[in-house]
């Protein structure tokens, strides 16, 4: 018997194809991963859509059942008005057309601002919603600065030349008087007419630094304003009013002016229309 057994041959059968394609294997793995990613993405978006639908349903449900409670929580209970002098609070509230109990979140502040600023005495308004129940209106009023006298009546104006109110024959001697103004242009707010009134107000401030008493400004010709005060007549040209008046102030201590009632000799007219010159005229 041989020490080494002869290895028996395997039975011959059909040949199996054991060759593998590496690229094919990778393609299968890639397709598998793509399939899993697609299924995951679809599941994710299904969850998102479902959540959104549930959220929308909850919002609708909440709006239907909590609307009155929300309105009560945000309703206006206080209307605060600051900065009043001539106007009163109720006038401003009437202009705003807002009533307590209205929903605060429904208020459009720009609309309220425009309504309030439409009043001639209101120069500017600021409207603020203050959580949770307050509407605050801050007013900056116009200030009377001049009386504009026309043939038919007196008109009260502010320093910007805007009409505050018609006075009829009433007057306020504490304010400067401006004449020579076109009434129709003034009421329409014509720019050139407003500028004439503004120049009169500025002139009153300048002359008031040196003279007491009411100033009367003749504004027929805006490039040649005339000021009357204490029996004296001042003529101004196109140069800045302050510069013209400074020239007069430098020589004023040397002048002998007329008496306050316009009587007696002395300087009765000062012409400042010419640059670097002052023309003085005496009256008897």
Image (cartoon, helix red, strand yellow):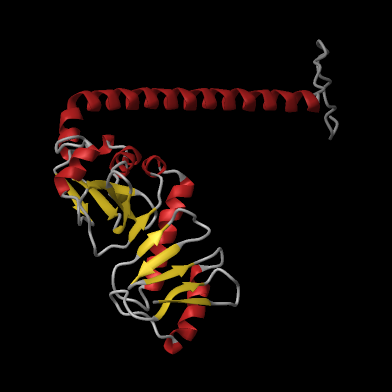
Q: Nearer the viewer, residue 137 or 250?
A: 250
Q: Is residue 86 visible?
A: yes
Q: Residue at x 38, y 40 (%)?
A: 184
Residue 266 location, x and y as percent? 40, 81
Q: Nearer the viewer, residue 103 or 170?
A: 170
Q: Nearer the viewer, residue 54 or 196?
A: 196
User: For this view, does 212 lie left or right of residue 240?
Assistant: left
Residue ranking furthest to the bottom = 254
Residue 131 location, x and y as percent? 23, 47
Is the residue 209 above or below the residue 90 in the image?
below
User: For this view, does 97 lie left or right of residue 32?
Assistant: left
Q: Quadrant of the N terminus?
A: top right
Q: Quadrant of the C terminus?
A: bottom left
Residue ranking furthest to the front = 284
Is the residue 132 above or below the residue 67 in the image?
below
Q: Quadrant of residue 4?
A: top right
Q: Residue at x 80, y 15 (%)?
A: 16
Q: Residue at x 28, y 37 (%)?
A: 107
Q: Quadrant of residue 33?
A: top right
Q: Nearer the viewer, residue 103 or 220?
A: 220
User: For this view, does 42 lie left or right of residue 155?
Assistant: right
Is the residue 214 above or below the residue 128 in the image?
below
Q: Is residue 125 visible?
A: no
Residue 8 location, x and y as percent? 82, 22
Q: Residue at x 20, y 28 (%)?
A: 67
Q: Quadrant of residue 171?
A: bottom left
């Amino acid at each position: 018997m041989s020490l080494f057994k002869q290895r028996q041959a395997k039975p011959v059968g059909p040949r199996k194809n054991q060759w593998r394609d590496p690229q094919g294997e990778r393609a299968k793995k890639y397709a598998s991963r793509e399939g899993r990613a697609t299924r995951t993405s679809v599941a994710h978006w299904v969850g998102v859509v479902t959540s959104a639908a549930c959220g929308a349903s909850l919002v609708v449900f909440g709006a239907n059942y909590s609307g009155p409670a929300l309105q009560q929580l945000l309703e206006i209970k206080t209307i605060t008005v600051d900065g009043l002098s001539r106007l009163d609070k109720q006038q401003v509230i009437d202009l705003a057309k807002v009533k307590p109990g209205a929903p605060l979140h429904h208020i459009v502040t720009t609309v309220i601002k425009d309504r309030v600023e439409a009043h001639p005495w209101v120069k500017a308004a600021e409207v603020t919603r203050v959580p949770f129940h307050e509407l605050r209106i801050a007013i900056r009023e116009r200030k009377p600065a001049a009386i504009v006298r026309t043939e038919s009546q007196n008109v009260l104006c502010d320093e910007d030349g805007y009409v505050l109110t018609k006075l009829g024959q009433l007057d306020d001697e504490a304010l400067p008087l401006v004449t020579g103004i076109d009434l129709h242009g003034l009421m329409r707010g014509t720019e050139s007419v407003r500028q004439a009134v503004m120049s009169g107000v500025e002139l009153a401030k300048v002359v008031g630094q040196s003279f007491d008493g009411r100033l009367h400004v003749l504004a027929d010709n805006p490039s040649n304003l005339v000021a009357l005060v204490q029996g004296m007549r001042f003529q101004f040209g196109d140069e800045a009013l302050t510069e013209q008046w400074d020239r007069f102030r430098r020589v004023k201590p040397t002048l002998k002016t007329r008496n306050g009632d316009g009587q007696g000799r002395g300087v009765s007219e000062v012409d400042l229309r010419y640059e670097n010159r002052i023309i003085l005229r005496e009256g008897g």
